[in-house]
Image (cartoon, helix red, strand yellow):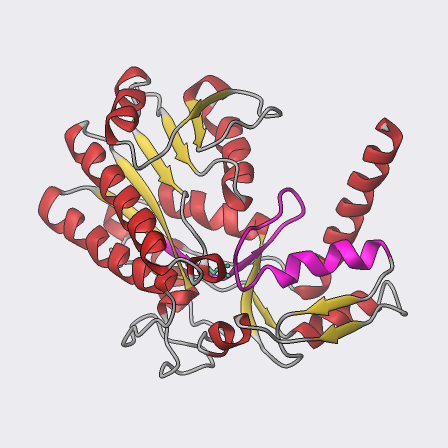
Amino acid sequence: MIKQEKILITGANGQLGSVLAKRLQEKHGVNNVVATDIVADEDFVGNFEILDVLDFERLKSIVIQNEITQIYHLAAILSASGEKHPKRTWDINTKTFFNVLDVSVIQNVNKLFFPSSIAVYGANAPKINTPQSYELTPTTVYGISKVAGENWAKYYFDNYDLDIRSVRYPGVIGHQTLPGGGTTDYAVDIFYKAINETNFECFLSKNTTLPMIYMDDAIRATIELMDAPKKSISIRTSYNIAGMSFSPEELTYAIQKIYPNFKTLYKPDFRQKIASCWPSSIDDSVAKKDWNWNPLFGIDEMTKIMIEELKLKQQTKLQKT
Ligand code: SER
């Protein structure tokens, strides 16, 4: 008989965590998922524990009590927020990861998921179709912590046989929860302005093309990688995955197909420097070959769904008030 997996998610209130938690509940059963975050989420349906992942003893006791077999470690500080407190970001992003790595080894957790990012690349990497393997010279503390994390992931796999798997997420776009503190967040914020038919002020310049991915693709990539047979995983640092690539101007054009009067004004700030060092598009051929990765959403489908879903959410909220 196949043993029932027991899942722990850190950062479960976040943009990805909140959607992943629901998807994992559907897959493994509500009672087999323990969502955790540093603050409570009153609306969460299922098992929820308050957890600061810096607190190793509390993490360990949650893992023991719930007989956890898989961990998805999503708690982290993102690129733009991270630059405001570089050392604190380094401490939080790396110490929490070590706690998760160590608890996994000590408690025999079967599988661990670690999110990496396009932020691992620096300005020297080829911008178009950035290859899986290239010198990693990140310019943000977030990126530095992800490169270190990728290497520690491989170290724990090589030395402790910990089955840790990872993808480098592009900017994630979803309607469920707002992202917080990222450089790609504009591509979510813009839709809230579009549905209210107001102009959007963009903190990146109009031609800053970045790799992006629609939430459904990002979640499916995560689950498919975790489900892939161990022998097919050739990358133990982190896999490049691509969804779509566009600039703020191209996203504005896509929105104008639905709202012709919609306008974006460009006021680049400190985040422009971060974005300018990142790839414009990603070569994900290794993920395609190893575990059949295949993105399904392009800019127009994504734009249509984002607008429909956010409008629906707004109407439902209005009806409740
Ligand atoms: N979306 C992230 C950020 O902008 C990159 O992984 O920080």
Residue 284 lies in the magenta-colored region: no
The answer to which of 193 and 129 lies nearer the viewer is: 193
Q: Is residue 179 above or below residue 285?
A: above
Instruction: Tell me where residue 289 appears, x and y as whole percent.
Output: 37, 62
The answer to which of 181 and 157 lies nearer the viewer is: 181
Q: Is residue 128 above or below residue 42?
A: below
Q: Which quarter of the image is occupied by the N terminus?
A: top left
Q: Is residue 211 left or right of residue 258?
A: left
The answer to which of 91 and 208 lies nearer the viewer is: 91
The residue segment tinted magenta is 167-196
Q: Is residue 152 above or below residue 268?
A: above
Q: Report which quarter residue 303 is drawn in.
A: bottom right
**Residue shown at the point (67%, 47%) measured from the top left:** 175
Q: Is residue 307 left or right of residue 220?
A: right
Q: Report which quarter residue 79 is drawn in.
A: bottom left
Q: Is residue 264 above or below residue 89?
A: below
**Residue shown at the point (31%, 57%) measured from the top left:** 87
Instruction: Tell me where residue 80 appears, x and y as whole percent.
Output: 49, 62
Q: Is residue 50 visible?
A: yes
